[in-house]
Amino acid sequence: MKTLKKNICESCGMLMKSMTDFGTDSDGSINTDFCHFCLDEGEFTDKGISFEEKIARNIDMAVKFGMSKVKASNLVKNTLPKLRRMRKSTKSKKVKNNAE
Ligand SMILES: [Zn+2]
């Protein structure tokens, strides 16, 4: 079985552990920079969201995954500004799903 190194979604900071956690590009290939909650077929599911909304949304998500609201809030506010999506455009490197 193939092992993947630690990947963190560059949009929400979620840890992605299996292939199904990754988002997909418009051509259907896996994009290891973003999770499937954030990137679906090359489109961000929350396209146009503001930074503040994004923070609130990510806190909600972390709470759903069992984190306390305070901890989630601290984590998101620390993590989000460092993520690539918040710094530049959505275009990123691709990893081909099947080797050629
Ligand atoms: Zn994500």
Image (cartoon, rainbow, N blue to C red):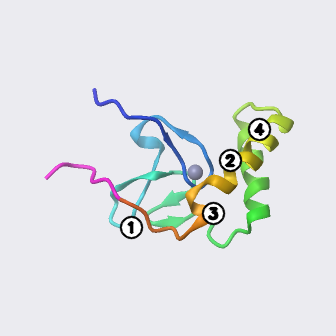
Report the Cα–Cα distance between label 2 and label 4. Answer: 15 Å
Residue type at mark 1 is Ser
Q: Which residues are magenta?
A: 94-100
On screen, 100 above or below 71? below
Q: What label sits on residue 63 in the rendered view?
A: 4
Q: Secondary structure at mark 4?
A: helix
Report the Cα–Cα distance between label 4 and label 1. Answer: 30 Å
N-term mark: 4 or 3: 4
N-term mark: 1 or 2: 1
Residue 5 in percent (x, y) is at 40, 34
Residue linked to disc 3: 86
Residue 97 magenta-highlighted? yes
Discs 3/1, front: 3
Q: Secondary structure at mark 1?
A: loop
Residue type at mark 2 is Thr
Q: Nearer the viewer, residue 83 or 42?
A: 83
On screen, 57 above or below 61? below
Q: Is residue 80 left or right of residue 68?
A: left
Residue 95 in percent (x, y) is at 31, 53
Dominant SS of magenta comes to loop
Q: Would the CB of label 2 be found within 8 Å of ligand 1? A: no
Residue type at mark 4 is Val
Q: Kindly indicate whether the residue at mark 3 contacts the one at mark 2 (C-beta within 8 angstroms).
A: no
Kindly give the residue lying farthest to the left in the view shown.
100
**At 81% across and 43% down in the image, what residue appears?**
73
Report the Cα–Cα distance between label 4 and label 3. Answer: 21 Å
Q: Is residue 30 left or right of residue 51?
A: left
Residue linked to disc 2: 79
Residue linked to disc 1: 26
On screen, 86 above or below 7? below
Q: Secondary structure at mark 2?
A: helix
Q: Is residue 95 left or right of residue 52?
A: left
